[in-house]
Image (cartoon, grey):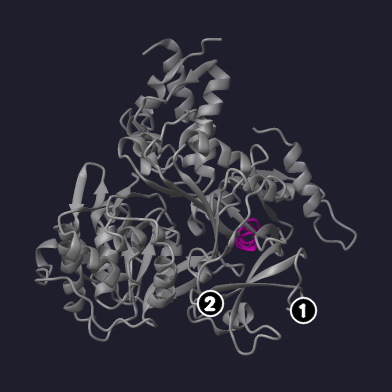
Amino acid sequence: MPSAPALNLVEGFLRSLHRYPQRPALEIEDRIFHYADLAHEASRIQQTILNCGHGGNGAPFVGLLAHRSITAYAGILGILAAGRGYLPLHPRFPAERTRTMLAASGANVLIVGEECRESLPALLQEIQPPLTVLMPETSGLKDSAERFAIHRFIFSDRFQPPASALSWRGISSDSWAYLMFTSGSTGIPKGVPITHGNAVAYVNSSCGNFNAEDRFSQFYDLTFDASIGDLFIAWQCGACVVCIPEHSVMAPAKIIREKRLTRWESVPSAIAFMQKLRLLKPALFPDLRISVFGAEALTVSAVEAWREVAPHSEIINEYGPTETTNAVLRYRWDEKSSPALCHNGYVPLGKPLSGQDICLVDENLNAVGEGELGEICIGGSQVSPGYWNDPERTRKQFLSLPGFGSRIWYRTGDLALRDSHGWFHYKGRRDEQVKIRGYRVELQEIEGVLRKISGCEQVVSMAWSAANGSPEAIAAFLPSQARDKEDDLLEGCRKHLPEYMVPRRFYYLDPMPLNANGKIDRKKLADFLKEKPRE
Amino acid sequence: MSETQLAVRQFVLETLRALNRGKNNELAAVDDSCNLVESGLVDSLGFLELVAAVETKFAVKFDFSAADPAEFTTLGGFVAHALPSPH
């Protein structure tokens, strides 16, 4: 029976805690944390945040530098239960990018997992405003007092004891739940704050099919907003979250089978990776009953491959940008009716979730009719209040539409059409944003870095696909005078950009192909990439 | 370790060096137990590229179907799975 809607993300977890304290809530490799164990760890973190001096009147967000560990998951719950939003940070992101996010968020408390201690010095050495660094699993850092004198450290032995029961207070539907950053065309990542109201709208409309027997994959990095589905749908239903270890993210076949997962969620390219490693066999995943794919276009061929390996699994395609809380459209594959509905081998995006609306608009923001191409605008309870501390960009992307009164819609930049059955179909972008393995990438951000390092004005970056499938990486084009600087270009890109945005291939062209308007001809460069053999 | 596997090992190290140009990773510290993915030396795409490159260059075939990713993503585990192609 579907559970009653949760009031906030913590309350959904607490309900399961009270019903199933001794059922597994989290598995990390061979370690099992029951709901009571996870609540205990979360409460330690909550209490320490509340008592570290920034608790009562602190910044709205707490940084969380932790990766697929107990601190990562208990940290999220502890931060939320303390009435703050979490700012997930990735240990592999360049320190400079992480510092930018921390500074933009205004966080003055940072929680660090033991697995991230090595990346901490590079991060802290250039941070000026003092931070309180909470390390729940770490007993000390060498020379930390001298090296990072401006910061205050609280190690595991100084953590507050957990409260007798994990609880939440002062969380309303407008309270911040998390802040996630996406690539920004100006070179500065955009902060997208999501409220508890936004997040529970998504989670509440996704819980219907699950129960306490279910075992959810936790595939996505926490910096990827799809991770909220892995975690909070599971915890609201009393199910277990099974962490996919870093080494298995690209080859999860063994863990899906051996951990007897019942729900899988990933980008569709995970299927392609397993196919390329020849890991998929018929009926390999007999326990899977729901498989959700999102963040990239889902092809019919990927669905067919997955149906063969997971014959008992329903297959769901989800669509939605970070600004509207993970997913607002959902499509359930139906063996009989779906093939005829697909366009050009792609699975429909689906129909809106409860409480969400889609309006397709032309360039003047007027709604277009059935079968006409338009830009997807999203309205409803999952729409973020706007970019963090960026009113100008918020005004541009979160706006009202003619004929819809004062209601706010998020303008996605994605193009789609609605067919006569009401299904939406993805038709590309109206700008130069691309997706690399599910991550949103603004090509202008990469080009800005390349331009700065090379000193060349004519630089182009493009999504690059090895086998005409989903884009897997970035290729860069520069004038031949930059050829000698390739090592500098790589080093500079790695300093500023996450790995998935660092170009895999550099091509040097003289002259660059130009179109009739005198601009670099991207179409010709795309054709060049298609013809270029894989090197 | 067969001669082919020794050559594969050398090739993998050279490829890692090329892939990680501009990074501060200390490749000298890479030993057989080093996990290539967890250490950040390759990402998922880089791992696939490594598989394809080794299969093409050495006429070997990787069979990871029964293997544990924790093992075959280490340098030693990866090399151990490079077996002569049956064709």
Viewer-side label of 2, 1: 2
**Magenta stretch contains residue A447:** yes
Count of numbered tags: 2
Location of mark 2 (residue): A380
**Magenta stretch contains residue B22:** no
Q: CA distance from mark 2 to mark 1?
A: 21 Å
Mark positioned earlier in the residue sequence (2 or 1): 1
Name the amino acid type tagged 1. Asn
Residue range in magenta is: A442-454
Name the amino acid type tagged 2. Gly
Disc 2: CA contacts within 10 A as few (<14), some (14-19) or many (>=20): many
Residue A70 is situated, as x and y percent measured from the top left of the image, at 24, 55
Q: Nearer the viewer, residue A111 or A1?
A: A1
Q: Which mark is residue A364?
A: 1
Residue A222 is situated, as x and y percent measured from the top left of the image, at 39, 59
The residue located at (32%, 39%) in the rendering is A260
Q: Is residue B5 above or below residue A134?
A: above
Residue A67 is situated, as x and y percent measured from the top left of the image, at 33, 54
